Each structure stands twice: as C-alpha cells, then as structure tokens.
Image (cartoon, rainbow, N blue to C red):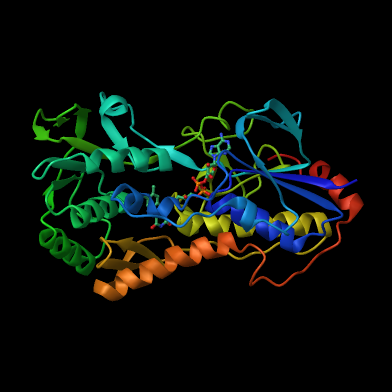
Amino acid sequence: MQHRIIVIGAGYAGASAAGRLARLLRREEVAITLVNAEPDFVERVRMHQLAAGQGLKPRPFSEMFAGTGVELRVAKVTGVDVDGKTVAVVDANGTEELAYDTLVYALGSGWNAQGVPGSAEHAYEIASRPGALRLRERLAGLDAGQTVVVVGGGLTGLEAATEIAEARPDLDVALAVRGELGDQLSPKGREHLRKVFDKLGITVHEHIAVAGVGAERVTTADGKAIPAAVTVWTAGFAVHPIAKLSTLEVTGTGQIVVDRTMCSVSHPDVYAIGDAAMVMGPGDKPLRMSCASGIPTAWQAVGAIAARLTGGKLSNAPIRYFNQCISLGRKEGLIQYVTADDRAVQAVLTGRLAAVYKELICKGAAWSVANPMLGLPARRRRVTRERAAADSAVRTPA
Ligand SMILES: Cc1cc2nc3c(=O)[nH]c(=O)nc-3n(C[C@H](O)[C@H](O)[C@H](O)COP(=O)(O)OP(=O)(O)OC[C@H]3O[C@@H](n4cnc5c(N)ncnc54)[C@H](O)[C@@H]3O)c2cc1C
C-alpha cells in the first residue's frame, strides 16, 4: 500500500513541497496529492503589479505537475480532522473526505484588516488575486487627481504605493505608516526610499494609526481625516481559520506551532509550512510571513518527511535571512541586506540594478515552483515500510 501524502495549498510553499516530494520519493510507494482552490499558480508577490494594471504569466498547475506523478485536486479545503487523518474538500461535484498518512498544511494567508471599522466595506486588499483584480478595476475608473491612500509601511505597502504611483502619475498617491517611512531599513535604505517616494510624488503620512476607513477618507486615532477615494490595506496578513478550528496546537493568530523540521508539535503526522506555520528562526524570533521564509520551510519539511520515511538523516540546516528585496515600481528597487534574524545592516543595493535583482528573485521563485522536478537531483529513496508505520507512534507529541 502506498503512503498517502496530501499537500493542501499550492502557493510558493505547498507547490514547492509537492514537487520536491515527488522528486525524492518513489512513485510506486508514495501517493502525493496536491489540493488547491484554484487551477493555476498565483504569484502573490506580484499582486501589486496586477493591481497596477500589469499582466501576469498564466501558470496552470496541470502543466507544472504534468509527468511528476503528483495528483492535482482542484478543490477548496473546508476542514481538517487531524485525529481522524482526513481533509474535507468541496468542488463542483460536491464534498469529499480525503484520507492521508502525512499532511502538509500550506494554506497561506489573506489580508488582515485588524477589525478596523469600515475596512471590510471600503478598503481594497492585494493579498489575493481577486482582491488585486478588484483594486485594478477601481483604479482604472479613477480620474486624474483622485487620491489613493495605501495603509501600512511594511514591504507590501512600500511596493504597492510606488507601483501605483509609477503606473498612474496622474493620481494623488499617499502612504500612511505607523512609525516613520522605512523605519525597518538602514539609514542608507531609508534615504533611498525617500528619494524614490519624492520622485514619484507620493505623500507620506507618518505616525498614523488608522482607526476607520470610509468611502472617501480614512480617519486616524487622533481624529484627523485623510481624503481617500481608494484605500488600499496592506497592514499585515492573517492565516486562514481552518487550523484553529482543528485540534492542532496553534498560536493566538492561528499559525500552526511546529518544531524545526516543520512538524506540528501536537500532531506528528502533520507538517505546516509557509505563512501557515509559526516557525522560530535565528535569534529565537518567529520567521516573518514571506516567500523568503516560506520556500525554505517547504524544503525543510520535505527533507524531514523523506528522511523519516526512508530512514535518512534529518537536516540541521537553519533557516536564515540574507536580504529584503523591495520593488519600488518597475524602474527602481531597494535590496536591504540583513542579519540572519532579519535586522537591517548598512549595505544596500539601490536603483535600476536593485529593480533587476528583485525581478530575478521573483522570476526565480516562480521558476522553481513551475519546474518542480528540474534542477534537483533525483534521489528516489525507498520507503522503509516499518519506518512509515512506526513514524507517528515513535514521535510522540511534545
Ligand atoms: C503584494 C505582495 C507582495 C509580496 N512581496 C513579497 C516579497 O517581495 N518577498 C517575499 O518573501 N514575500 C512577499 N510577499 C509575501 C508572500 O507572497 C507570502 O508570504 C507567500 O505567498 C506565502 O506563501 P504560502 O505558500 O505560505 O501561501 P500562499 O502563497 O498564500 O499560497 C496559499 C495557497 O493555498 C490556496 N488556498 C488557500 N485557502 C485554500 C482552501 N481553503 N482550499 C484550497 N486551497 C486554498 C491558495 O489558493 C494558494 O494557492 C508578498 C505578498 C503580497 C501580497
């Protein structure tokens, strides 16, 4: 009988994991099913580009996984029963329960309006493709001089504000940030950011806590109103509630708590990767929700699953950061080099070269997902039957 591995969620983390598992394990011994709500891969890191009117390359999973042995199931996951070891899915044909021996949970995240009044009704989000397309349509309908306020000074907010301002120089684009512009960056990084924001004519509202979003303005905690024909909310991501509704051990925000092999601390048959997982990184700090951490968590989980099933060695390689790659429109960029635990150091790369570097990173991430079997040595390891059976029994929950 084959060992059944189900990967739920085919974003950067889940799709990478499914491809790698197929590369490492023998088809006749392991059945890998990849469940995703949509039939094609969504390059989430380009959602601000999509919103600003650019076209994205279609990446159907049927092409990406052709010949890999991975069974693709286009369906929406509605729940996981981690004690009964099943995943509930729904598609056009109705509902079904899929049984697994090992589950890889990679459902990613969506936007997080943090309960700010009016945000659900009036704000636009770019954490998902439908959200980005909705914003794209709205932006296309704006007249010259109308205001767009991007809320959130994180990397997504910086990328969104600059992309929109570059694509629509006729609009009045503003960014509202809690602290100062780019305060997570080095002095050189901040200086460059200001220069690009000035060049693009973006107004920066600093030390702002947005307390409400209306149809034509955002209001701040200290009672000010900032005109906004369109408000784009980028202040944080939230994970899907599915894990929280199960008996998995999760954090208050719903991320699955895992050990350094990405194995759930409460359910040893479950691995969580990408945004869905709470992973402690260098300096005992949780990894930030990003591709930069999500793809390495997939590699880590795959290595551990293969090692445990085949009797191989577990990897000790820590996940660390090298840089933060920020696009500032299509012509400008900022590569902020960081310590292993993601703190900015002095060195930065700026300008056109940084834009090209960032583009190569995005292309490389999509390429590695779209070509899951290429570039990896095939080490089809034999599953040790006793090991697969004993696996969950031996690793008792912490
Ligand atoms: C505009 C923007 C720019 C970004 N830029 C960067 C960047 O430059 N660098 C960086 O490192 N990170 C960046 N990020 C963050 C990065 O995109 C995410 O951290 C990353 O996509 C997380 O990968 P993931 O595989 O965990 O989840 P996702 O990529 O979100 O994938 C989750 C998958 O699960 C599927 N899914 C969700 N719910 C269900 C369900 N119920 N049933 C079935 N399938 C489901 C989705 O369709 C999706 O395919 C950016 C994000 C945004 C929004």
Can the viewer see residue 126 in this picture?
Answer: yes
Q: How many numbered marks does the figure carry?
A: 0
Return the x and y of residue 322 as percentages of the image width and height.
Answer: 42, 68
Q: In this view, does 156 lie to the left or right of 9?
A: left
Return the x and y of residue 397 as percentages of the image width and height.
Answer: 71, 39
Q: Is residue 298 left or right of residue 320?
A: right
The quadrant the C terminus occupies is top right
* Vertical comparison of 68 with 352: above or below: above
Residue at 55% x, 41% y is 38
Q: Classify residue 200 by image quadrant.
A: bottom left
Return the x and y of residue 314 as percentages of the image width and height.
Answer: 71, 61
Return the x and y of residue 100 as percentages of the image width and height.
Answer: 77, 39
Can the viewer see residue 338 in this picture?
Answer: no
The quadrant the N terminus occupies is top right
Residue at 43% x, 50% y is 44
Q: Is residue 11 left or right of residue 391?
A: left
Residue at 32% x, 67% y is 336
Q: Classify residue 78 by image quadrant.
A: top right
